Amino acid sequence: MKRSIPLFLITVGLVVLLDQITKSLIVSNFLLHESMPVVDGLFNITYVRNPGAAFGFMSGASPAFRGIFFSLVTLIAVSLILYHLVKNRIADPFLAFALALVVAGALGNLLDRLRYGEVIDFLDVYISGYHWPAFNIADTAISIGAVFLIVEMVRRREPDI
């Protein structure tokens, strides 16, 4: 546990910092919906705002409801992860890192909701006319953390040989 807590805290801090710096750069250097090709036919930097969650979930709800709902869900999820980390004295650095990525991503997007009322997205991946919904560093951290958690669950379920 001694190694996992500093790893957890450093990871959360660095990912939130990177997420917020990249979003600030986008907001200050791009107009809304402005796009800059990075790899033609595959990847653009495109400034968009997402009032909802993944894939626009709840984007049609009132801004007040969305703000309260997403803030509460984020705070509950982060609290549960922190409780699990401390209560179970997580010593596995891989598990601590995976949990840190999820927490950092959740906090990064929560900061956007508090600052802007919606989440800043800018990573635009596409092939031909088929675009994946734009995302950001926080979303990436949550996704990678979730994959790592699945790997950890599978790893723990495998019988020792």
Image (cartoon, rainbow, N blue to C red):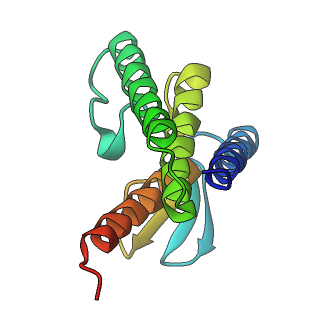
Q: Position of residue 102 (x, y in %)?
A: 48, 48
Measured along the vertical axis of the image, is residue 139 above or below residue 38? above
Residue at (61% x, 68% y) in the render: 37
Residue at (67% x, 51% y) in the render: 2
Is 151 placed left or right of 116 in the picture? left
Q: Position of residue 30 (x, y in %)?
A: 69, 45
Q: Quadrant of the C terminus?
A: bottom left
Which residue sits furthest top? Answer: 64
Residue at (52% x, 64% y) in the render: 94
> Can I make out residue 130 in this image?
no
Measured along the vertical axis of the image, is residue 160 above or below residue 139? below
Measured along the vertical axis of the image, is residue 1 above or below residue 51? below
Is 129 placed left or right of 92 in the picture? left
Which residue sits furthest bottom? Answer: 161
Q: Position of residue 92 (x, y in %)?
A: 52, 61
Foreground residue among 121 and 141: 141
Foreground residue among 31 and 101: 101
Residue at (67% x, 55% y) in the render: 3
* Quarter where residue 28 is shown: top right
Q: Tally the numbered discs.
A: 0
Is 129 placed left or right of 87 in the picture? left
* Quarter where residue 133 is shown: bottom left
> Can I make out residue 124 in this image?
yes
